Image: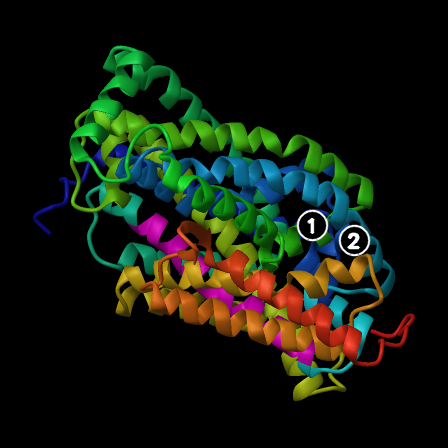
Amino acid sequence: MSDLNPVNPVAMTVFVAFFLLVTVVGFLAARWKRGDLTQLHEWGLGGRQFGTIISWFLVGGDFYTAYTVIAVPALVYSVGAYGFFALPYTIIVYPFVFAVMPKLWKIAHAKNHITAADYVHGEYGGKWFPAAVAVTGIVATMPYIALQLVGMQVVIKGLGVSGELPLVIAFVILALYTYTSGLRAPAMIAFVKDIMIYIVVIAAVWLIPVKLGGYAHVFDAADQYFKAKGGATGIILKPTQFTAYASLALGSALAAFMYPHTMTAVLSSSSPQTVRKNAIFLPAYTLLLGLIALLGYMAIAAGIHVKSASDVVPTLFGTLFPSWFVGFAAAAIAISALVPAAIMSIGAANLFTRNLWRPLVSPNMAPAQEASTAKFVSLVVKFGALLFIVFLPTQYAIDLQLLGGVWILQIFPAIVFSLYTRRLNTPGLFLGWLVGIVIGTGLAIEQGLKPVFTLHVGDASWPLYIGLIALAANIVVTFVVSVLTPRRAALGASA
């Protein structure tokens, strides 16, 4: 392809070397913290035995992904300060994790719940509402996995390699070691990935401004660029963006730990204390995220011009760093795709097996069959995401991931409110979920799959995150219907 750089042998050698390293680590992970991998809680939750350090790397590894490293600077490069909404979102989320997730962990551990839908079934019984929660999680996760492929595709293209073959090879390897080692593989690889990303980002925020004349010049160049560009862009938020920015941050924070991959990482922790400690220490990643976002401004100051904003980070590194470091950075970002993609596929496979296949098709399946089904489904999920990227425009994955955030937010009342009140019942939660899904999807389609809808109240206009609007409707319906219908019975230990 004419828009590709020539292949750099040094960068490619470094990239391949680190990729081989994590491949070896992925296969060796099956021998680490040994357990019976024919049991789903061992394969899909690592035996619930990950301590503070491992969990810190694992949660960080699946929460801060390759697409984060590519997309956040790209958004800042394109629109300026508005792209920083990811920072308050990751600040809001950890007090929520500290307060809520240890309580959920205790119930899940006591009743052997592996998924969020298991918890819903344990609290409310039945099979159709837990199935709806499971389908929501799986559908919201699929485009998220596809976006990890987008991140990997971008860095491979930055190294000068065209076509889908490298992507296919990478994900065949990922599929094999995930099948073999389960959650232990991304947990081990997360150590390598996070250390590499920290090195890349610290080197970038230290050396790039030095090359560009300092941070004052970086911010000044970005300011001049956005003033010339006009519109709603700038290095300071416009007043008209305040409500959209705040609601995106809040809605994204509430949705973040409803996803199957983050839920899986939390439930694999060894104790409630481990979850709390991680909520205390994980904000170190927020600092990292802020530094990553600044790469968007640095690209402007460096005079980077790209056809697609997603190419900003690879182009910036390729322009300003030596070949060996370009290969190292590309490997770090590509590995940042492997860790969350593995956990996402495991989380989706757990949901399918426990909350769709077993209750609806094979209620008498043995534990070993449960694990083997989940392993097979994890392969299907990964290759489904791969086909998505190979045969459909990338924009579909981005649009669907935005919708995925709206959808996953609608299981929030069933998971979180149920931890604190017994006033809610299945009809209320089911109808609330349905109303939230319909309103959220309808508004998103009306806006051309953009995440913000403007509410008009009199002369005032309030741009708000669609997921939050849909959640508000969901909550109202849930409580009204629960008040008007009989209260749920306590199910005790049923699961």
Disc 1 marks which residue? Answer: 266
Q: Residue at point 47% right, 33% down?
A: 289
- Report the amino acid beneath label 1: Val
- The image shows residue 398, relative to residue 64, as above or below, that is below
Which of the two residues, 464 or 300, is positioned nearer the viewer here?
464
Rendered residue at 42%/57% (across/down): 456
Q: Report which residue position mark 2 lands on.
A: 105
Q: Residue 205 falls in which quadrant of the image? A: top left
Secondary structure character of the magenta stretch overall: helix
Q: Position of residue 373 (x, y in %)?
A: 62, 76
Magenta stretch in the rendered image: 129-153
* Numbered disc 2: secondary structure: helix
Q: Amino acid at mark 2?
A: Trp
Position in image of residue 157 (x %, y %): 23, 47
Q: Are marks 2 and 1 in contact (CB under 8 Å)?
A: yes
Q: Earlier in the sequence, mark 2 or mark 1?
A: 2
Is residue 177 visible in the rendered image? The answer is: no
